[in-house]
């Protein structure tokens, strides 16, 4: 399958598999029985994913509404289906000694902005693949909001990137 769609990049500083688990849980609002790597979400083995992440350090985790979307995906790649939804992927790569220059950072808890660097001993580079640019596609924006919220255990609201 060719990689199509729109990529939004993240560096996840916490436990990537826990973020994937929370993201999957957040998708249930819209897709109660979605598929994770072609398995029903309630049967997906997140601990096996953890072992895979440690062993391989780079791969993809896929999410789709159902088998019909899987078939649509094979034919159309990351695209919006007639229902206005599409498949989602998390392409990831574990990195060590991550140093990021931040043009602007913020603390939602303390309400201030800053510039500078962020350093992490280990981080996971994630490319969130959605059907379209979240700025132009309501479904893709909803997915991006869910992924952003999944990075913070206390925030299950699915808020947008800017909130």
Image: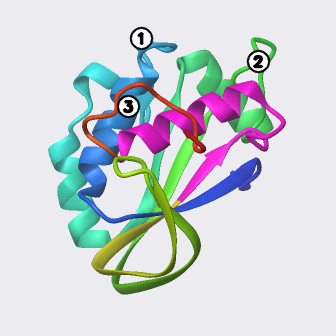
Circle 1 — which element?
loop
Quarter of image, res 97: bottom left
Could you tell which of marks 2 and 1 lies nearer the N-terminus?
A: 1
x and y percent of residue 124 in the render?
38, 68
**Quadrant that contains the C terminus:** top right
The residue that mark 3 highlights is: 24
x and y percent of residue 126 in the render?
49, 61
> Taking 149 as reference, is 58 above or below it?
below
The residue that mark 2 highlights is: 84
Of residues 82 and 127, the one nearer the viewer is: 127
Q: Are marks 2 and 1 in contact (CB under 8 Å)?
A: no
**Crowd tier of the residue under label 1, counting other residues whose Cα lies within 10 Å: few below 14, some 14–19, many 20 or above:** some
Quarter of image, res 34: top left
Q: Can residue 27 be spotted in the picture?
A: yes
Circle 3 — which element?
helix
Question: Distance of mark 2 from mark 3, alpha carbons?
Answer: 19 Å
Q: Does the magenta-highlighted stretch encompass residue 135?
A: yes
Task: Residue at 45%, 24% (x, y): give it.
Answer: 27
x and y percent of residue 139 in the render?
69, 26
Q: In the image, which disc is placed on residue 6?
A: none
Bounds of the magenta segment? 127-151
x and y percent of residue 113 in the render?
51, 63
**Crowd tier of the residue under label 3, counting other residues whose Cα lies within 10 Å: few below 14, some 14–19, many 20 or above:** many
Task: Residue at 78%, 35% (x, y): give it.
Answer: 79
């Amino acid at each position: 399958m060719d990689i199509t769609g729109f990529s939004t990049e993240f560096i996840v500083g916490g436990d990537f598999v826990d973020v994937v688990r929370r993201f999957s849980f957040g998708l249930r609002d819209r897709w109660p029985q979605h598929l994770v790597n072609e398995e029903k979400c309630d049967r997906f083995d997140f601990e096996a994913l953890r072992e895979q992440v440690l062993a391989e350090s780079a791969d993809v985790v896929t999410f789709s509404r159902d088998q019909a979307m899987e078939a649509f995906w094979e034919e159309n790649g990351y695209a919006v289906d007639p229902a206005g939804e599409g498949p989602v992927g998390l392409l990831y790569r574990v990195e060590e000694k991550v140093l990021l220059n931040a043009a602007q950072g913020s603390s939602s808890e303390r309400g201030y902005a800053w510039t500078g660097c962020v350093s992490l001993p280990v981080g996971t580079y994630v490319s969130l693949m959605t059907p379209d640019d979240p700025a132009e596609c309501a479904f893709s924006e909803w997915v991006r909001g869910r992924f952003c919220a999944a990075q913070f255990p206390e925030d299950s609201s699915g808020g947008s990137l800017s909130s």
